[in-house]
Image: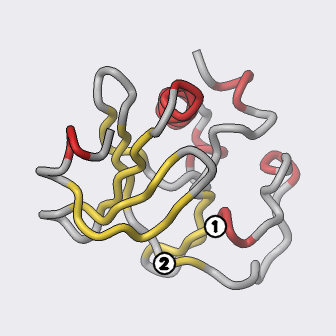
Amino acid sequence: MEEKHSQILGKLIGKGGSRNVYEHLFDKELCIKVASNKKAIYSNKTEWSIYKNAPEHVRDWLVPAVFIHPSGEYIIFKKGQKVKELPFIIPDHLKARDTDNPINWVTINGRHYICDYANYRFDKKYSK
């Protein structure tokens, strides 16, 4: 799917099981997760839905989602810096599978955010 959207994709900055993450070609403060299969399209749509529907006390901890392609083939987020360790205890309302893994966190302007939240237990609660 990357070829279809190459006009906005910058350098590859991350790889997951079924999504690649690129720097936005024109706005270096954004990143783009591109789906490689139907499961990844579902993950993109789930992250978009969670971000848009989560209550503020949860959304404040989620890396901001900016745009999703209508098909779900890609989703654009604010880009953060990866962290090596979490310098705080995760609040109870955010505890879910892998939220304690630093690989799923970034910092933006000194604040910590969860950057991969499609498969957390709270997805059923906040996605529609």
How many residues crowd around disc 2 within 10 Å: few (fewer than 14), some, or many (20 or more)? few
Residue 4 placement, left or right of 34:
left
Residue type at numbered disc 1? Trp
Residue type at numbered disc 2? Gln
Q: Which residue is mark 1?
A: 105
How many residues crowd around disc 1 within 10 Å: few (fewer than 14), some, or many (20 or more)? many
Tell me if residue 50 can be seen.
yes
Q: Is residue 80 above or below residue 93?
A: below
Find residue 74 and report its horizontal and vertical position in percent: 36, 39
Q: Mark 2 vs mark 1: which is more N-terminal?
A: 2
Spatial separation of the CA atoms under disc 2 and disc 1: 8 Å
Find residue 105 and report its horizontal and vertical position in percent: 63, 67
Q: Which residue is at 68% across, 69% downward?
A: 103
Q: Which residue is mark 2?
A: 81
Residue 17 placement, left or right of 37:
right
Residue 39 placement, left or right of 72:
right
Element on which disc 1 rests: strand
Q: Which residue is at 48% across, 78% downward?
A: 81
